[in-house]
Image (cartoon, grey):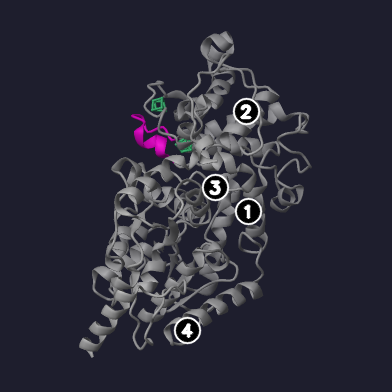
């Protein structure tokens, strides 16, 4: 019950914070990865185990593996060593994490989460720690520490909100990533992260949808777009020589409400006559490698570029996805780039050169569409979205990792007449996470998801009560999958939609039949329809 979960009592820990013992509770942990998924990815120590077991069946030399892994990464990643050394414990980040705000567990303060790793660093990798141990803030590496890492590094959505407030720019998400990467070395990983990663590696997308299933899904969407508009649609798959490769999160073609976003893309591409193709192998923008290890992230990112090369496209356009863009903007170039075999993206409609994508050769669909709108290339009727009073959730990765703040808003303002922002300290760079990112969106982890999503839901509640908001828009597939549950729990009556769903509603396509319903099949509001009919008659 919401009344129960909202009772959050900040309780200082009874004992020393350095005690690593954790009470694992159902509802706040993710299940372990199935051995077949570790095997598929070539990861070590595949076995049957669960976090609630007392014996995690770690390899006999697990301690050496972790310390060697840590040493290697301290040498390889300068940021890792820096983040281990420079925290002054000012506490500015302490109350900025949604998991701390929603759970009141002190170890969910970003500074404390990082300290779980830092204490091991001090003990084994600093002179004072090696000599003075606990007196110098060090801790022994024990099996309980491994369990504590697992618990708290899988209670961080790698959202980077805390880093916005850190005067030193310490990125706790990077520390979480290192923690998860080290845990992976001894086979401590979660199924909700590794199963999609393994499927993506073997087949091309998270659910392991085979090429014929992929084609069926897109054909179905094309038929539906045709029915809505009265126009013919075709989605080109694996078409060599197209100008643009379009990559979307797979949820767009199998999930709801994502699917309506897909309809919006298809309508847009047809209307502007975009010369594009999708790929049956690069049929996933999401990259769950980001949530497990750099090596897996690199391999999953590479397949998009290999497909771009194979198909001979000029550049890549990416759909509404969250972490795809974090991987693209922060890691792609040093992992697999530069993509010199592609061209600097240029909009074939407006001639805009996307200088920001000079290295990655990949443009975000919101940048692309906002540019079209800015140049007056789309005919839009925002009245078709009159049943919605919308707000916008800045998905963490596009907002904080790539600064995509204005483009989605400029689209929304063009396609929707009722739009209200949530409070300033909950949007843009300071946006609150959905609470289910970074591979935490499992059902078994539901209590922690609802707790972690509480600050976001609270801001939605504010605009619902103040302005009657009934739609939360966003541009991330994980958000679209998890926010409906969160809102149903904390703010019933608010639905979730992608920005390109609203664009698809508002887009007046050349030669379309009279449209009476939106992409969800809901009739346009009566007065809206009347106004549309009158103005179209005037126009004629
Ligand atoms: S990255 Fe996000 S989830 Fe992780 S500690 Fe920081 S605020 Fe919390
Ligand atoms: S804000 Fe930065 S320096 Fe201050 S406690 Fe947090 S991580 Fe450390």
Whether label 4 lies within 8 Å of ligand 1 gets the answer: no
Q: Nearer the viewer, mark 3 or mark 2?
A: 2
* Mark 3 or mark 1: whose residue is earlier in sequence: 1
Tag 4 and tag 2, C-beta contact below 8 Å: no
- Disc 3 residue crowd, few under 14, some 14–19, many 20+, Cα 10 Å: many
State the image quarter where residue 162 is shown: top left
Q: CA distance from mark 4 to mark 2?
A: 53 Å
Q: Secondary structure at mark 3?
A: helix
Q: CA distance from mark 3 to mark 2?
A: 21 Å
What residue is at 41 percent from the left and 29 percent from the top?
95
Tell me the residue that label 4 is attached to. Answer: 226
State the image coordinates of residue 457 (x, y, percent, origin top left): 43, 45
* Mark 1 or mark 4: whose residue is earlier in sequence: 1
Q: Secondary structure at mark 4?
A: helix
Q: Secondary structure at mark 2?
A: helix
Q: Secondary structure at mark 1?
A: helix
Tell me the residue that label 3 is attached to. Answer: 290
Q: Which segment did they paint magenta?
A: 160-171
Q: Indicate whether residue 169 is drawn in magenta.
A: yes
What residue is at 67 percent from the left and 61 percent from the top?
202
Tell me the residue that label 1 is attached to. Answer: 197
Q: Nearer the viewer, mark 1 or mark 4?
A: 4
Tell me the residue that label 2 is attached to. Answer: 148
Name the quadrant of the C terminus: bottom left
State the image coordinates of residue 483 (x, y, percent, origin top left): 49, 52
* Mark 3 or mark 2: whose residue is earlier in sequence: 2
Q: Is residue 246 above or below residue 333?
A: below
Q: Indicate whether residue 145 is drawn in magenta.
A: no
Q: Nearer the viewer, residue 291 or 294?
A: 291
Q: Left or right: 482 with respect to 205?
A: left
């Amino acid at each position: 019950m919401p009344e129960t979960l909202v009772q959050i009592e900040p309780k200082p820990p009874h004992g020393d914070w350095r005690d690593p013992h954790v009470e694992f509770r159902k509802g706040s942990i993710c299940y372990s990865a199935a051995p077949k998924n570790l095997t598929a990815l070539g990861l070590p120590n595949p076995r049957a185990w669960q976090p609630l077991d007392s014996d995690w069946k770690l390899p006999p030399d697990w301690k050496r593996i972790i310390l060697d892994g840590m040493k290697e990464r301290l040498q390889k990643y300068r940021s890792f060593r820096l983040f281990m050394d420079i925290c002054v414990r000012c506490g500015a980040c302490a109350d900025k994490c949604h998991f701390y705000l929603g759970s009141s567990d002190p170890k969910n303060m970003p500074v404390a989460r990082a300290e779980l790793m830092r204490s091991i660093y001090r003990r084994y990798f600093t002179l004072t720690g090696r000599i003075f141990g606990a007196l110098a803030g060090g801790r022994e590496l024990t099996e309980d520490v491994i369990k504590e890492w697992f618990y708290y590094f899988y209670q961080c959505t790698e959202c980077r909100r805390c880093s916005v407030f850190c005067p030193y720019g310490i990125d706790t998400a990077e520390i979480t990533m290192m923690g998860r990467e080290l845990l992976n070395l001894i086979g401590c990983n979660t199924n909700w992260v590794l199963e999609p990663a393994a499927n993506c590696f073997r087949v091309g997308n998270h659910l392991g949808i085979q090429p014929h299933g992929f084609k069926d899904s897109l054909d179905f969407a094309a038929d539906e777009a045709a029915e809505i508009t009265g126009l013919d649609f075709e989605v080109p798959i694996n078409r060599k020589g197209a100008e643009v490769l379009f990559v979307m999160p797979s949820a767009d073609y199998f999930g709801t409400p994502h699917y309506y976003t897909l309809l919006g893309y298809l309508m847009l591409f047809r209307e502007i006559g975009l010369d594009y193709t999708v790929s049956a192998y690069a049929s996933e923008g999401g990259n769950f490698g980001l949530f497990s290890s750099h090596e897996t992230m690199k391999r999953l990112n590479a397949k998009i570029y290999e497909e771009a090369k194979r198909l001979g496209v000029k550049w890549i356009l990416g759909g509404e996805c969250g972490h795809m863009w974090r991987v693209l903007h922060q890691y792609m170039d040093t992992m697999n780039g530069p993509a010199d075999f592609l061209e600097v993206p240029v909009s074939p409609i407006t001639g805009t050169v996307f200088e920001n994508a000079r290295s990655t050769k990949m443009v975000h669909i919101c940048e692309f569409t906002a540019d079209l709108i800015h140049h007056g290339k789309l005919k839009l009727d925002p009245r078709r979205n009159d049943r919605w009073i919308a707000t916008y959730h800045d998905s963490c990765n596009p907002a904080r990792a790539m600064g995509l703040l204005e483009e989605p808003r400029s689209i929304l303002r063009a396609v929707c007449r009722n739009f209200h922002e949530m409070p300033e300290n909950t949007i843009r760079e300071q946006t609150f996470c959905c609470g289910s990112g970074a591979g935490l969106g499992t059902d078994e982890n539901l209590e922690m998801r609802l707790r972690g999503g509480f600050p976001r839901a609270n801001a939605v509640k504010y605009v619902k009560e103040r302005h009657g908001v009934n739609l939360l828009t966003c541009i991330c597939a994980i958000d679209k999958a998890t926010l409906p549950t969160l809102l149903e729990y904390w703010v019933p009556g608010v639905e979730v939609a992608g920005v390109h769903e609203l664009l698809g509603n508002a887009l007046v396509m050349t030669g379309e039949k009279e449209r009476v319903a939106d992409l969800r099949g809901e009739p346009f509001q009566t007065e809206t329809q009347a106004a549309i009919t009158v103005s179209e008659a005037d126009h004629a």
